[in-house]
Amino acid sequence: MTIRLVVFDFDRTVADIPAPSTWELIDRALNCEEEDRSLNQAYHSGKIDYATWSRETVELYKRYGLNKSKFEDVMKNYVRPMVGAQEVLDSLRKNGKITAIVSGSILNVYDFLRSRYGVRADYVSFASEIFFNGDGNVTGGNFTNYDYEGKVEAIERICEQAGVPIKESAMVGDSHNDIFAFRKVGLPIAFNSKDQELIKEAKFVIKEKDLRKILPLV
């Protein structure tokens, strides 16, 4: 099988963070975990969709004092590139592969990683983006349903733009929300994952926190 497009999840795949997701990392920094837990329950029970959950979560962050300065402090203190991330993305491009990041996370975190460490992909699709005004205050954002099943829609859109059939793409991910994408792509790779259902859907499993391990596979 020829792989022409390599798609990465972001949190704990391209970005190394000390939390299951960037959302939870910000929850901890703002001390609003308990209140956000109720929003999470509403989402997972089907009462609200992902876009509504993320919009309401950002409103919660706003009430708990999130601004651009505090957001950047969290990024600087806790967000790093995964081992080998920049090397892998650069190597894939040099070898004619197209790279993409598809994530239910926040675009601002990718922007931080790109500007500070030079980590970048050819295509990016993030479920959410937080807007800050000139004073650094949160003014809203852009919120979509590109998570879980929505990740497949995002990947299909990138495949169409890049002119690549989805079966000629690989997906590298670590979380339960990558399962639907794993079932659609040609080469699903579980990376440093503890989710047994995701691991069962993977063709290859990488246990080390080193993205360079994927290079012989794609």
Image (tube, rainbow, N blue to C red):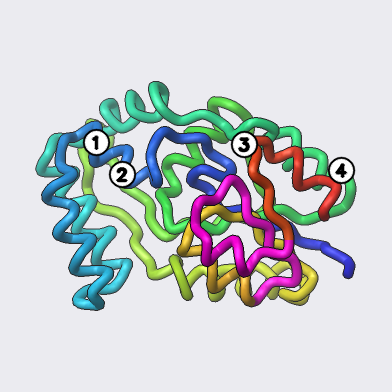
Taking 14 as reference, is 162 left or right? right
Taking 69 as reference, is 109 left or right? right
Mark 4 Cα-neighbour bin, 10 Å: few <14, some 14–19, many ≥20: few
Which residue is disc 2 drawn over? 24
Horizontal and vertical percent for residue 7?
Answer: 66, 58
In space, the residues marked 2 and 4 are separated at their CA atoms by: 35 Å
In space, the residues marked 4 and 3 are separated at their CA atoms by: 23 Å
Q: Are the residues tagged 4 and 3 within 8 Å (C-beta)?
A: no
In space, the residues marked 3 and 1 are separated at their CA atoms by: 23 Å
Which residue is disc 3 drawn over? 209
Name the residue type under label 2: Glu
- The residue lying at 38 percent from left, 67 percent from top is 144
- Answer above or below: position of 11 versus 145: above
Tell me, yes or no, whether the highlighted magenta stretch contains residue 178. Answer: no
Which residue is disc 1 drawn over? 28
Q: Earlier in the sequence, mark 2 or mark 4?
A: 2
4 or 3: mark nearer the eye:
3
Q: Earlier in the sequence, mark 4 or mark 1?
A: 1
Q: Are the residues tagged 2 and 1 within 8 Å (C-beta)?
A: yes
Mark 2 Cα-neighbour bin, 10 Å: few <14, some 14–19, many ≥20: some
Mark 1 Cα-neighbour bin, 10 Å: few <14, some 14–19, many ≥20: some
Q: Earlier in the sequence, mark 4 or mark 3?
A: 4
2 or 4: mark nearer the eye:
2
Which residue is disc 4 drawn over? 94
Name the residue type under label 1: Arg
**Callout 1: helix, strand or loop?**
helix
- Answer above or below: position of 205 versus 152: above
Q: Are the residues tagged 3 and 2 within 8 Å (C-beta)?
A: no
For residue 6, what is the image quadrant?
A: bottom right
